[in-house]
Image: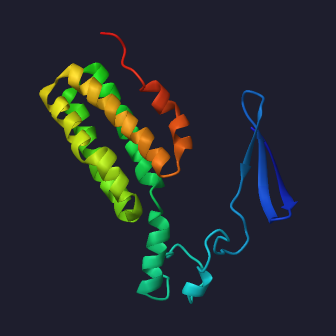
Amino acid sequence: MTSVVKYVLTAAGAFLLTVALTAGGGWTEAVAQTSEPSRFPTGIQGLADGQDEPPSNRWLLGARDDEERFRRLQVYAGGTDQQMWQIGYRYEQVYQAIVDEEWELGGHHWGKLRNVFNVALMKRPNRTPNAERMFLDDTWQLLASALEAGDTAAARDTFLQERQACIVCHVAEGYEFINDAPMFEETAAFPAN
C-alpha cells in the first residue's frame, strides 16, 4: 500500500491528511486527530463560564458546581427527541408483532412504549394533558388487552386507533409534519390475512 501524508490548512486550522492507495487500486483518506487545543463547542452556551479548568473528558465532573453539573445533564438529556425516536421504534415493532401474531413481543414493546412516553412527558409536562387524553389513558389499555388476549382483530383495530391518536396529538402539539414520516404510511393498514 502506498501512502501520501500531507498537512492541509483550512479556515478551521491545520490537520493531517493521509491518503493511501488500497490493494484494489482506489484511494482512501484518513484524517488524523487535530493538533489544536481542546475547546468547548460553540453550540452550547455557558460551558466555559461553568468550569474553572480547561475542557477535557471530565465534561461533567469538571464543572464548577452541582448547579452547572445538573444544567449539563439537562442539556445532555435534551427534550423529547430521544424518547420520541424510541417510541417510533417500538410503535413499528408493535405493528410488526401484530402482523406476525407475536403477542408477547407486541405486549413487551407496548408496555415499554408507555414507560418511555411518560419519561418524555416528565421533560415536557405541557404535553401531558393531550398525550394522556388522546393516547395513554383508555385507548392504550385497549391495545394492551388485545395483545394480551392474542386477539388479532381487536389488536389491529386498536392499533389503528392508537395510530390516529398519534397523528391527532402531533397536530394538536404543532408537529403535524411528523405525520409525514414513512412509519405512518407503512402502518396505515394491515396486510390481508
Q: Percent x, y for residue 82?
A: 45, 53
Q: Which quadrant holds the N terminus?
A: top right
Q: Quadrant of residue 41?
A: bottom right
Q: Is residue 116 visible?
A: no
Q: Residue at x 36, y 52 (%)?
A: 130
Residue at the extreme left of the image, as rendered:
149
Q: Percent x, y for residue 20?
A: 76, 42
Q: Residue at x 78, y 58 (%)?
A: 16
Q: Percent x, y for residue 63?
A: 49, 83
Name the residue nearer the viewer: 111 or 127: 127
Q: Residue at x 23, y 44 (%)?
A: 111
Q: Percent x, y for residue 132?
A: 30, 52
Q: Residue at x 78, y 61 (%)?
A: 15
Position of 164 relative to 39 (above/below): above
Give the left or right position of residue 183, taking residue 156 as reference: right
Q: Which quadrant holds the C terminus?
A: top left
Name the residue nearer the viewer: 78 or 35: 78
Q: Quadrant of residue 128?
A: bottom left
Q: Is residue 13 visible?
A: yes
Residue at the extreme top of the image, as rendered:
193
Position of 14 relative to 88 (above/below): below
How many dots with numbers? 0
Q: Which color mode does the image show?
A: rainbow
Name the residue nearer the viewer: 48 or 148: 148
Q: Quadrant of residue 25?
A: top right
